[in-house]
Amino acid sequence: MRHLIATMFVSASLFSGTVFAEDLHAGDIIVSLNNGQFQVGSAESGLHYQEGTGYAIFEGDFRDFARGPYATSNPGFDSATNTFAPGSIIGYQAIGNLWSWTGDVWTNVVNNGETISVAGAYGETTTWGVDGISGDSFGLIGQAGSTGKIHSHLDFSISSASGSPTDGVYFITLQLVSLELQNGALVLSENGYLSSDPFYLVLNNGLSASDAHHALHDLQDNLVVAVPEPSTYAMFLAGLGLMGWQLRRRQQA
């Protein structure tokens, strides 16, 4: 049955021209190609890029109430007509782990076990936590219709281990990949378009717009480095102490 549904999905071009808007939507992640490689951009001026890596930074807000108080379907993914070969299957690949903004620095430590998830268009669920990725590591964004265009909005959500997720700003890392159908399942394609560079999605959960922009600009200006857990830091200091003790013994000998 799954194989039949999958075949119908591809043959019918689920994301067909009847769903697409022909204009490029402001705020969406605009997908294009450059020498066969996925590129991401914006229909608006002023897209942010991280210093050092050059990775693009996009924004979303869980409190825009597009999907409730702790979920959003923005930004979406959009492309111009005739960007892709009809039937091309475009997906996302999850990278890294979840980061949160303390008000001063970015850290991969969260207050209440927060995680961020995205629901792929083929039933996938991908979750970013401070320890990495769980669930499906990649998922479907959309399939180009007869006009060679995609326009799709996935659902992003934030949750916590207990209670409501902490107000704050978070970011996750993705890249665009080509997918193909094999035996009713979507898999990473070795014959499709080249994967995009990674890009960041900064998601605000309850902070002011000015605080969210402060966090975004810090990500833009600095390469983030994981802050070790207190226990890890203590082990690190203990290791340094042991090295110093051994060095002193050698010098005394």
Image (cartoon, rainbow, N blue to C red):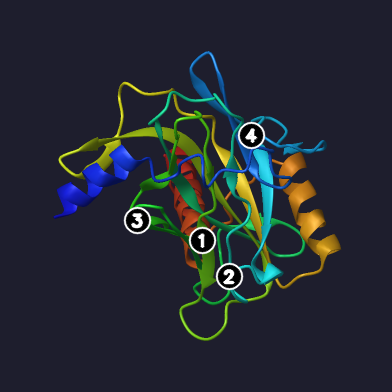
Q: Which residue is mark 2?
A: 67
Q: Which mark is residue 155?
A: 1
Q: Nearer the viewer, mark 3 or mark 2?
A: 2
Q: How many marks?
A: 4
The residue furthest bottom is: 163
Mark 4 packing: few (<14 Cα in 10 Å), some, or many (20+)?
some
Camera sees residue 208? yes
**Cα–Cα span, label 1 and label 3:** 11 Å
Q: Residue furthest right?
A: 210
193 in relation to 220, above or below:
above
Write down the residue under mark 3. 124
The numbered disc on residue 231 is: none
Residue at 69% in and 52% down:
59
Q: Is residue 61 above or below residue 17?
A: below
Amino acid identity at mark 3: Glu
Element under label 1? strand
